[in-house]
Image (cartoon, rainbow, N blue to C red):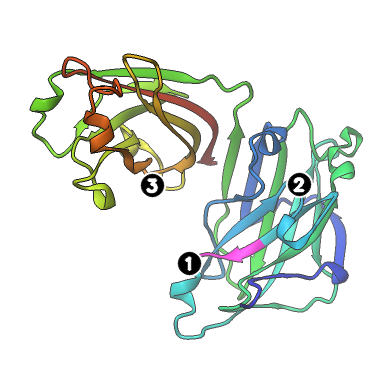
Amino acid sequence: MANPISSNADELARSISEAAPSHFTLKIQSFSLLTKNDIDKYESGEFEAGGYKWKLVLHPGGNKSRNVKEHLSFYLTLADVSSLFRNNWEVHAYFRLFLLDQRSDNYLIVHDATGKARRFHRLKYQWGFDQFIPIRTFNDVSNGYLLDDSCVFGAEVFVTKEMSSGKGECLSMIKDAISSKHVWKIENFSKLESEYHESQEFFAGDQKWKIQLYPKGRRHGSGSHVSLYLTLADSATLAAASKIFAEVTLRIQDQQQSRHIAGKVSHWFSASSQESGWAKFASLVYFHHSGTGCLVKDICMVEAEVTVNAIANTL
C-alpha cells in the first residue's frame, strides 16, 4: 500500500515574516493537554484555498508512524480525497506552514527549499514536515512559540493565482476538566413500547446531553442486546465545523451487588457525529436475569459520566 504522507524534510527551509498566514489559522490553548489526553494527532477543520479544501494535521509529540522523535510534525492534506480523485485528478500546489513567535509578533515560516510545487494525488495526498520544529525549541519560552501554554499555527496554499478569504479554527483544551454524572431511573421497564427512550437533558462541559436506551437493541444488537448511547441533545446549535472531544462512561447499575455493566469511550462529537455508544451493550439474557441486579422491581438504573476535554470552534 502506498504511503499517503510525503515529507520533504531534507529540502526544508525556514524564514521569518511579519505577515500572518492568509488562508488558515489554528490557535491551540492549553497545548500541553494534547499529550496528557493522549491526542497524538489533531486534524483541523477544512479550509479553502485555490478552489480546493484542505486540512492541517499536527502531531504534537512527533509522527509516531514515521518514527519521529523530539520534533513536532506538521502537514497539509487535501480533504475529501476519495471524491476529488475518483477520476485520477492531481493538484499541484505551493504551500507554507506558519508558527507565531508571540514575543516578537513574527511568524516562523517553514517551506520547501527547492521552490517546487508539490503534487497531491490519490496515493500521496498529504505533504509536510516530519521535523517541523524541535520540541525543546518550541517549549522554550524565550522563543515565544508557546506562551501561557497557547500557540498559533497557520498555512498558505497556492494552487492558482486566486486566493480565498482567510478562515481559522481555535482548539481549546480544557485544563482540569470536571467529570459530570447523570443517573437515569427507568421505571416500569417491562412496559416500554417505543423503539428507544431518552433521558432528560443534562449538562456536562457546558453542553447538553441525553442518554438513549434501546430496550430490544439497535442495528447489529437488535433482538439480542440492550443498546446504549450518549448523544448531543442540541447538535443543531453547533456550527458545522465545531467539535467536542469527550470521555464517556456509560453504566447499567447492578442494584444488588454493585457489579455494574460499564463501557468507556473517547469520541469527537459534532453535528455530523452526534452520538457514541454500543449496539451490544448488554445481552438481553443477562440483563433480564434476576441475579444480575440490572432490573429490580421493574426498575433500571442507567448512569452516564462525561468529561469534556477539548472544544474546537471556528474563529
For mark 3, does the 10 Å Cα neighbourhood hold few (<14), some (14 to 19), or many (20 or more) residues?
A: few
Rounded to the nearest whole Å, what is the CA distance between mark 1 and mark 3?
17 Å
Residue 244: image location, x then y, percent: 48, 37
Residue under label 1: 80
Looking at the image, which residue is at 39% across and 39% down? 238
Stretch in magenta:
76-80
Q: Of the residues shown, which amino acid type is indicated by label 2?
A: Gly
Q: Nearer the viewer, residue 159 or 237?
A: 237
Q: Nearer the viewer, residue 179 or 56?
A: 179
Residue under label 3: 273
In the image, is 148 to the left or to the right of 275? right
The mark that comes first in sequence, 3 or 2, is 2
Rounded to the nearest whole Å, what is the CA distance between mark 1 and mark 2?
26 Å
Residue under label 2: 61
In the image, is 81 to the left or to the right of 304? right
Q: Which callout, 1 or 3, points to the residue nearer the camera?
A: 3
Q: Of the residues shown, which amino acid type is indicated by label 1?
A: Asp
